[in-house]
Image (cartoon, helix red, strand yellow):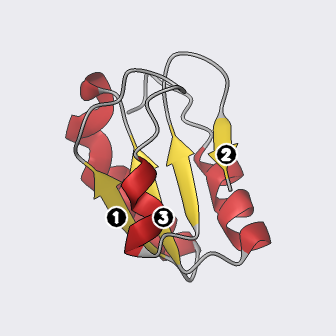
Amino acid sequence: MKSYDLELERAVNDIKEAKAKLVCIQLPDGLKPQAREIQQHLEKNTDAKIVIWMGSCWGGCDVPVNVKDMGADLLIQWGHSVYIRSW
């Protein structure tokens, strides 16, 4: 994870700002091996429970719409482009 700037502190701040209690993170395949480390960092620094979307992640247009049905307050996607925060 050291070779990427994942903007984890920005994610922490967004989670806190949204007062999110359940957050889904969506990662491209290349970052999925670091999913647990990212999850632990976010949970340690916020009051949120973090779940990892293990389905596809083909970019900002590949939003797992059923995540809202799970009760997620926030979806954070990581990719090769600009940081995206949804709802």
* Residue closer to the observer: 66 or 31: 66
Looking at the rendered structure, the secondary structure element under dot 2 is strand
* Drawn side of residue 23 relative to residue 56, left or right: right
Instruction: Say which amino acid is labelled 2.
Output: Arg
Answer left or right for 60 relative to 51.
right
The residue furthest right is: 17
Instruction: Check disc 1 and report its element: helix, strand or loop.
Output: strand
Residue closest to the eye, 69 or 81: 69
Residue under pointer 1: 51
C-alpha span from label 1 to label 2? 15 Å
> Residue 13, relative to residue 65: is it above or below?
below
**Disc 3 to disc 2, C-alpha distance:** 14 Å
Measured as percent of width and height from the top left, residue 30 is found at 27, 23
Instruction: Give the image location of residue 20, x and y in percent.
Output: 62, 75
Looking at the rendering, in which quadrant would you find the C terminus? bottom right
Q: Nearer the viewer, residue 60 or 78?
A: 60
Query: Along the polypeptide, which appears first: circle 1 or circle 3?
Result: 1
- Asked where in the image residue 45 lies, by quadrant, the reply is bottom right
Establish if 34 lies above or below 45: above
Secondary structure under the numbered disc 3 in the rendered image: helix
Q: Which residue is mark 3?
A: 68
Q: Which residue is mark 2?
A: 85
